Amino acid sequence: MDRNARIYVAGTQMLIGAAILRHLKREGYENVFSDPDGDNPLRDANTVDKFFVEVKPQFVFLAAGKSGGINANQKYPAELMLDNLVIETNVINSAHRHGVEKLLYLASSCSYPRLAAQPISEAALLTGLLEPTNQAYAVAKIAGIELCRAFCQQYGANFIAAVPANAFGPEDDTDIEDAHVIPALMMRMLDARAHDQPTVNIWGTGSPQREFIFAEDLADACEFVMQHYDDSQPINLGSGSSLSIRALAEQIQEIVGYRGELFFDTSKPDGMPLKMLDSSKLLKLGWQQKTSFTDALKATFEWVVEITTKRETTHVR
């Protein structure tokens, strides 16, 4: 994948896709294409196929499909599952039909069994029951992994799959109720600070351990495996460290400057008790994370503040 290659990043309106697009442009790739215009264009097979005819991409990063935190997964399981199934089917099939040289599909760490041995290796896929709170979404992501493997097996396509740790950063969802844990906590604490609220409610016990990766580092890892990895077995993309939800909330509390109490609502589900990826395969290939977790949190919070300020200004007008 040289600097003149024609590259399509699917999902550029979302966290990971936006980060990949920014990264490739910073690295000097000159022919990078974002999603076609329209409302949910990737859910229409004809639109996707026409786009591939026009753009003629040689390489595809498939980071599209809706996602969300535990709350969103419980409220919208059918929507999350259908959106991911339709998009991955349309894009992967068009990539094959139009001779794409290589495709990288981004799955999710929730694709692994709930009680998989930790840290989770790629071999754990399909060896146990999934976490019930996000099972529909996970099944859709597993289908994408298996679809890539099926095209490899039947047609010899170089379609690879990667499983990232929990990504966060600019361009993430900032819906307080449905967002992933990091932007959701930042938004809640920022709002509580602004309105002098004495407590912020957090779902669960705070004990589950999670591994996070900054979206900018993840984008770098995606480019790296596109260059250096060719195998039908998925590859984990992780940072190599984890922390509890409680410890995460306390770090965010310090960055936000919120001085109230954090109340952990134990009547709400925790999700998987521990989720950390074994990324030794990636690290042995030579990839290294570049951003410290604290710096990544601060950069994310700066973006959250910017987005919040824009919303408030628009509302006042």
Image (cartoon, rainbow, N blue to C red):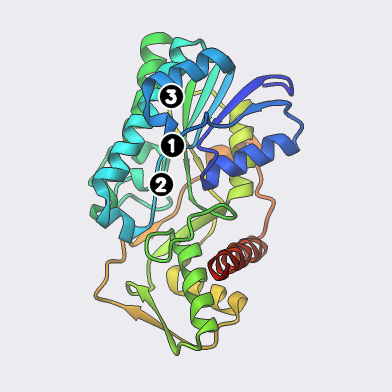
Position above or below: 265 against 306: below
x and y, in percent, of residue 267 in the image? 24, 75
Residue type at mark 2: give it.
Answer: Ser
Instruction: Give the structural element (helix, strand or loop) at label 1.
Output: loop
Residue tagged by mark 2?
109
Marks 3 and 1: in contact by CB < 8 Å?
no
Pointers 2 and 3 in contact (C-beta within 8 Å): no
Q: How many C-alpha atoms fall within 10 Å of the one at disc 3: few (<14), some, or many (≥20)?
A: many
Quadrant that contains the C terminus? bottom right
Nearest-to-viewer mark from 1 and 2: 1
Amino acid type at mark 1: Asp
Residue drawn at x 41%, y 43% is 108
Q: Establish if 251 lies above or below 168.
A: below
Residue 199 point in image, percent of width and height: 42, 86
Quarter of the picture holding the N terminus: top right
Q: Are marks 1 and 2 in contact (CB under 8 Å)?
A: no
Task: Identify the residue shown where x is 63% and y is 61%.
Answer: 303
Between 210 and 18, the one nearer to me in the picture: 18
Tag 3 residue? 91
Question: Where is residue 96 drawn, in percent x and y?
Answer: 44, 14
Determine whether 18 is above or below 96 in the image: below
- If you read the primary sequence from the N terminus, does the residue marked by circle 1 or circle 2 appear first? 1
Q: Quadrant of residue 228?
A: top right
Specify the label residue 39 is tagged with: 1
